[in-house]
Amino acid sequence: MARPSNTFDSLSLTIAVTPQIKQYLEDMTLKGTFGSSPAEAARMLLSNGIDAMLNSGALERRKWALKDGELVLVAPDQPALTS
């Protein structure tokens, strides 16, 4: 299943992994539920891990808003921005 289109621009991030991790990511793509490439599998795992940390309270959820067509972080003591 293809992932839905991003509402916002994506940024590139380069990470280094061991050969073992790369092999596991490739194995995950063979199952068909973690994308079609090791990079897509890594993106999905990272996203799922962050979601789990947010849901458990281990990571504080941040507030974001659109300002002049750009996504910006809203400081905890500032009201949400609107365009």
Image: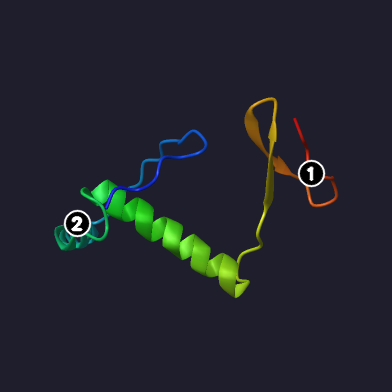
User: Is 70 above or below relative to 64?
Assistant: above
Q: Looking at the image, which residue is at 45% across and 40% down?
A: 6
Residue 29's label in the rendered image is 2
Q: Is residue 7 left or right of residue 16?
A: right
Q: Amino acid at mark 2?
A: Thr
Q: Secondary structure at mark 1?
A: loop
**In-front residue for pair 21/12:** 12
Give percent across and percent down for residue 43.
36, 51
Residue labelled with disc 1: 80
How many residues crowd around disc 2 within 10 Å: few (fewer than 14), some, or many (20 or more)?
Answer: some
Q: Amino acid at mark 1?
A: Ala
Q: Looking at the image, which residue is at 45% across and 36% down?
A: 10
Q: Is residue 18 left or right of residue 68?
A: left
| Quadrant in the picture for residue 46 | bottom left
**In-front residue for pair 2/57:** 2
User: Is 22 above or below relative to 58?
Assistant: above
